[in-house]
Image (cartoon, coloured by chain):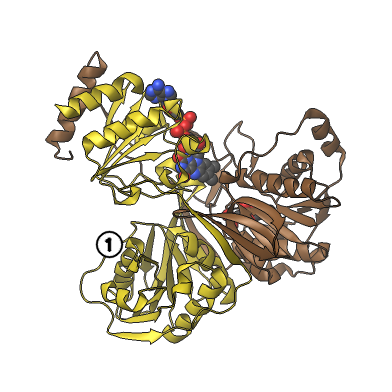
Chain colours: A yellow, B brown
Amino acid sequence: MARNILVVGELVGGQPTSTTLEMLGGAAALAEGGTVGVTLLGAGAAAAAAACAGASTAYANDDAAYDTFLGEQWLEAVGAALDASNAELVLIAQSTAGREIGPRLAHRRNTAVAMDCTSIVSDGGTIKANRPAYGGNAVATYSFATSPAIATVRAKSFEVASGAGPSNTVALPAPGASRVSVTGREKVVAEGLQLQDASIVVAGGRGLGASESFRVLEEMATTLGRDKAAVGASRAAVDLGWYPPSQQVGLTGKVVTPDLYFAIAISGASQHMAGCSGSKVLVAINRDAEANIFGFAKYGIVGDYKTVIPAVIAELKK
Amino acid sequence: MHIVVCAKQIPDPETPPSAFRIDAASNKVVPAQGIAPVLSQFDGIAAEAALRIKEANAGSKVTVISLGADSAASAIKQVLAMGADEGVLLNDPAFEDGDSYTTAKTLAAAIKKLGDVDAVFCGRQAADWDMGQVGLLIAEEMGWPVSIIAKGVTTGGAGLQIQRVVEDGYETVETPLPAVVTVSNEFGEPRYPKLPQIMAAAKKTVTQWKTADLGLDAGEVGAAGARLKLEKLSTPPRGGAVELMPGDSPEEQAAALVAKLRADKII
Ligand SMILES: Cc1cc2nc3c(=O)[nH]c(=O)nc-3n(C[C@H](O)[C@H](O)[C@H](O)COP(=O)(O)OP(=O)(O)OC[C@H]3O[C@@H](n4cnc5c(N)ncnc54)[C@H](O)[C@@H]3O)c2cc1C
Ligand SMILES: Nc1ncnc2c1ncn2[C@@H]1O[C@H](COP(=O)(O)O)[C@@H](O)[C@H]1O
């Protein structure tokens, strides 16, 4: 059954984010002959459209004021695109912007949103959204009593489509008023390779015992190659101030799907697994043989990280 | 300043996966034996944020509201023990099995009934369903501005100054009042009530409101008013068996691991 779909895109440095491209891939598969539109707001929006494989129409505004996310401004623009596209399904990233836009747009359109979905399917013509609940201990499947159906989508939930970008562009309004204003900004990101882009993640947890131990994990990442490997952390480690929040993996942190994930002194709570269970190979290093993490791992070492990790580093150097 | 804290009681999110059960027929979580329900973690942090503002602004008041069954009164008592002034429990069979929308609509009706509210503080998400919607939907119901995932909130500027967590760091935003704020774990730990405060809170009466008290109709709350329909709740598949690295020393185990990863061409 053909359905029109609108994807709320996001730009970083003038390029569509990977989740934007993934949602477009998902939308292209779900449209079943309907149209796929993408909204692009901020500097470089019109040019970024070319990269949006899967979309037939771009709804764009280049105004750099949109680079600072303000929900009320974005809602106006996305609302205009929704009117023009006549979409029955709206896909939004589970991001800073999406977490705010999803529920507010749903309320303004007298409909509902399912947050943080990991798959969306057409079941006999009906849209169904699957999402983890209870911290990842359960999967909930929802349908919508109202239209449009709105879903925010977790990173890496769909495959990117190939092919050309949209053939036509519709202009969205310039940013309007916002009651909330941004007065300051502090960037806190790790240098170099970003966690989500790394093909290897070396993650540490509360069992490391001290922030200095993350230096050993950094040494391991360096040995594996700083162009491939990044260091992550559990929330327990982040909450203790041992590693920056930008490196947190999990339900309330980043979702990563590397080829290789080392969970070192991490117990494997469902909320942590929500961020790394899509890894191709998971290696668990934990001194507790009963730790939950071993239930998710392909390979495991039962032992103290203090002796195991230096041995792994030495072996990697051979 | 009158701040409302929305607080939900949930099954303990640290329940180990081995003790987590779903009743397939009702699509509901079976309460784990011997594990008591708790105040949703982020809501305790939202309460902490509200109480710090109360302490910094003389004459302020904090009211805690929960929508839930009888047992949710203990979540309210916990926030009262922390230092909140009043508690309201929205308790009516008609409220059951609602979605984020009906929950927010019901909470907003209670906030309107209180009347003199300057700000509503919610958790970033309830740690059972992890939706992260209700604060935003309350803001839309009230027609108020909203800022989410705060790691800091103080009075100042246009009304409130909020540090919000964004993908690559933090932003400071300013909002006029009345407003809604959702608070995240980056804010810090909530205070731990002492025994005399717990005993004083136990004696406080919690106001109870039902559908009619809020001027709502049974058809617009709970399952009847829900827009999102839960079709199925299931347990996700788990990975296969782990292959533990053999060896009597860390060196042998490390060698076995690295050999495996090299053979698999992962490194
Ligand atoms: C709503 C919600 C959202 C959450 N979001 C996240 C999230 O995004 N990310 C996240 O990670 N968590 C999240 N959590 C927290 C989660 O529930 C766990 O509390 C957390 O993941 C535990 O972190 P940990 O595994 O590092 O610590 P612990 O559970 O304390 O585990 C430490 C592990 O280290 C092992 N260990 C100790 N010493 C050594 C040693 N010397 N050598 C080897 N192993 C050792 C122990 O055996 C243990 O298994 C969330 C929780 C809630 C309620
Ligand atoms: N039943 C409830 N009673 C009181 N507050 C709630 C309830 N449900 C949600 N909230 C508030 O809304 C926040 C977000 O909830 P949710 O959208 O369900 O993830 C929670 O952290 C609470 O502050």
The chain containing the residue under callout 1 comes to: A
- Secondary structure type for disc 1: loop
The N terminus of chain B: image quadrant: bottom right
Q: Nearer the viewer, residue B221 or B112?
A: B112
Residue B127 in view, yes or no: yes
Count residues near mark 1 (Cα–Cα under 10 Å), then give few for <14, some for 14-19, many for 20+: some
Residue A161 occupies which quadrant of the picture?
Answer: bottom left
Q: Is residue A35 above or below residue B146?
A: below
Number of marks present in the image shown: 1
Q: Residue at (70%, 69%) from the top-left corner?
A: B142
Q: Nearer the viewer, residue A127 or A162?
A: A162
In the image, residue A210 lies at what x, y percent? 45, 26
Q: Position of residue A242 (x, y in %)?
A: 47, 34
Observer-nearest of A295 and B143: B143
Quick check: A48 left or right of A39? left
Instruction: Look at the image and tell me in which quarter the C terminus of chain B lies.
Output: top left
Residue denoted by label 1: A159
Callout 1 amino acid: Glu
Point out residue A70 in the picture as x, y percentages from the top left corner. Answer: 54, 68
Q: Residue at x 48, y 66 (%)?
A: A143
- At horizontal 29% and vertical 32% (from top left) the residue drawn is A219
Q: Is residue A295 left or right of residue B177?
A: left
Decide: is B9 above or below A5: above
- x then y, percent, for residue B16: 49, 34
* Quarter of image, res B136: bottom right
